[in-house]
Amino acid sequence: MDTTTKQRLITKLYSLFGLVLSLASIAVLATLVCTIAAAFVFALAFFLPRNALGAALSAMVHAVRTGSPPGALAAAGLVSSFLIYSAVGAAVLILARLRAGSEWRRPIAWRPWRFLERRRAFWIICACALLYSFAADVAFNYIDPRAGAWLKMPDDPAQAAAIAILAVIFAPVVEELVFRGWIFTRLRQDFGFVSALLVSSAVFAGMHYEATHLYALAVFPIGLALGAIREVTGTIKSTIAFHAFNNLVACVLGFLDTG
């Protein structure tokens, strides 16, 4: 191994270590934000017991402690999900600002979306991904009948609406900030497109592991499609839009199944 090759290898190892360290920093920042917010919620539940808001918060705190009643426990889970997504998104933006200053949009690929340029490739990828999503949903329900229950929306309108907001707005924005923004952009710069695509998609799929590994495997091709959209358009605005639309379709199908 010559000196130049060795130097390139060392540079890539340092870059990979930097990416891992930055992800750990995002996790720490998000945990800090969640801890502060949770402490605030507990304080409200303690100091406002007679208020309607205080009563609702107290019910959720009690549900977390005891595991009942189911409705309050589900509400607490949704509040936690909103909190976690918000904290992670804030952590990514804070770290991008600390790293790049006024150029904070660059590390997360927050660039203008000129989708009319190269629109053929963009629409082909989107169409293929949507067809795959539908086929995967049918196959998943056939392989594992429990999948229908996982994807079905709850009967309670408030919970169903909260899940839809979480799936169509919060999840696409925050997940794209992390996977196609922070991770893909860093890997693309130092390791090339293929490595960035495969690694970001694998991590994306792993984070969607549910009761079975089959769901994570089914999500992996969607990660590939999102990475390809990111590469074609050069911005995560396009991946957020497609991710949101894909989740919206899933929510609509879930509502129809409930009805």
Image (cartoon, rainbow, N blue to C red):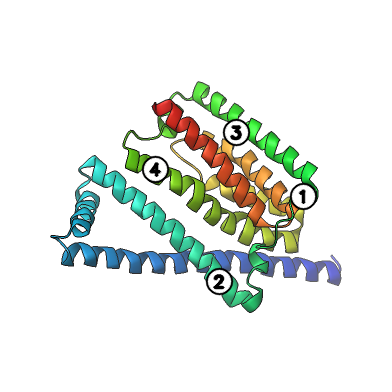
According to the image, label 3 marks what residue? 133
Q: Which of marks 3 and 1 is in front?
A: 1
Q: Which of the numbered marks, if any, corresponds to residue 161?
A: 4
Q: Which quarter of the rendered picture does the C terminus lie within?
A: top left
**Residues marked 4 and 2 touching at CB (< 8 Å):** no
The residue sitting at 48% across, 45% down in the picture is 167
According to the image, label 1 marks what residue? 116
The residue sitting at 57% across, 68% down in the picture is 22
Q: Which of marks 4 and 2 is nearer the N terminus?
A: 2
Q: How crowded is mark 4: few (under 14 residues within 10 Å), some or many (20 or more)?
A: some
Q: How crowded is mark 2: few (under 14 residues within 10 Å), some or many (20 or more)?
A: some
**Residues marked 4 and 1 touching at CB (< 8 Å):** no
Q: Is residue 35 above or below residue 195?
A: below
Along the viewing direction, whichever of 163 and 219 lies nearer the viewer: 163
Residue 146 at least partly seen: no
Residue 87: horizontal and vertical position, in percent? 44, 63
Residue 174: horizontal and vertical position, in percent? 53, 56
**Mark 3 → mark 2, Cα distance in angstroms:** 33 Å
**Mark 4 → mark 1, Cα distance in angstroms:** 33 Å
Q: Dot 1 lies on which element?
A: loop
Residue 240: horizontal and vertical position, in percent? 60, 51
**Residues marked 3 and 4 touching at CB (< 8 Å):** no
Left or right of residue 2, residue 155 in this image: left
Which amino acid, by three-letter code, is at mark 2? Answer: Leu
